[in-house]
Image (cartoon, rainbow, N blue to C red):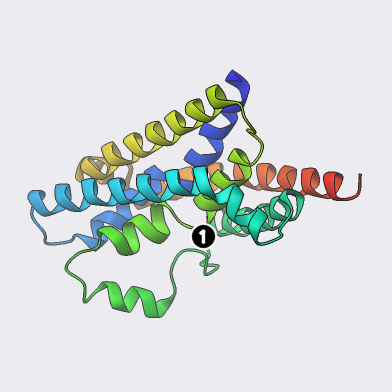
Amino acid sequence: MIDELIKFFVLLFVVVEPITLAPVFASLTQGADDAYRRRMSFKAILISLIVLVVCALAGGRFIQLMGISIDAFRIAGGAMLFLISLEMVFARESGTKTTQEEKAEVQQRADISVFPLAFPFIAGPGALATVLLTFSTTGDNWQLTLGLLGVIAVVLAITLVVLLLTPFINRVMGVTGAHVVSRLTGVVLAALAVQFILNGLRGAFA
């Protein structure tokens, strides 16, 4: 159980990318006061928590109702996470985060907590796929389920701290430092994504 919790923490932390979210948040809130940054940070984390918890508790039933097997979802989710890892390693925009049209829309919004902070940056496709893949294997193990929900809360708490400390983090790390962290974690995510695909293929053809 401890191994599962640690693995889930690493995977979700890498997908959410709290450290590399700091320069993005700084650019979105450029010229705003501290009160606005705090309000957007807390609201985005709360919305992300609700989305991820609902996905964790009801996502498995939903894919069953849709007639999608867990192995098929493992393969699809692994492929999606692999695309995100390529984006992180090569610093390219693969379209898994935001499109150019969405970025233009952000510039006209006063409230950035729901879009693009909560979705797609924090509780985005990668995070949702990770949660669904992980919780689909818990079964009736409520201890593991509660532990995994606790991990979600911890990752989001870390993300909240990063958002609140964005000015300080930007001064210490800078854009280059954030990119280095993103590339290193991208390699880890790529390996985990491939493992998801292999597990799905093994289950599908067993």
Quadrant for the C terminus in the image: top right
Residue 99 placement (x, y as % from top left): 44, 74
Decide if residue 114 is on the left or right side of residue 2. Answer: left
Residue 11 placement (x, y as % from top left): 56, 39
Residue that sits furthest to the top in the current view: 2
Above or below residue 149? Residue 177 is below
Residue located beneath label 1 in the image = 91
Instruction: Residue at 8% x, 54% y: name it.
Output: 33
Above or below residue 15? Residue 142 is above
Instruction: Residue at 76% x, 50% y: name it.
Output: 71
Residue 195: tell me if it is visible. Answer: yes
Foreground residue among 104 and 7: 7
Residue 195 placement (x, y as % from top left): 74, 42
Decide if residue 16 is on the left or right side of residue 159. Answer: right
Residue 190 placement (x, y as % from top left): 65, 48
Q: Residues within 10 Å of mark 1 (few under 14, many from 20)?
A: some
Instruction: Residue at 63% x, 45% y: name it.
Output: 133
Residue 76 figure quarter: bottom right
Residue 186: tell me if it is visible. Answer: no
Foreground residue among 32 and 128: 128
Quadrant for the N terminus in the image: top right
Residue that sits furthest to the front in the current view: 65
Residue 177 figure quarter: top left
Residue 19 figure quarter: top left
Tag count in the figure? 1
Dot 1 amino acid type: Ala
Considering the numbered disc 1 on the image, is that residue within a helix, a strand or a loop? loop
Residue that sits furthest to the right in the current view: 206
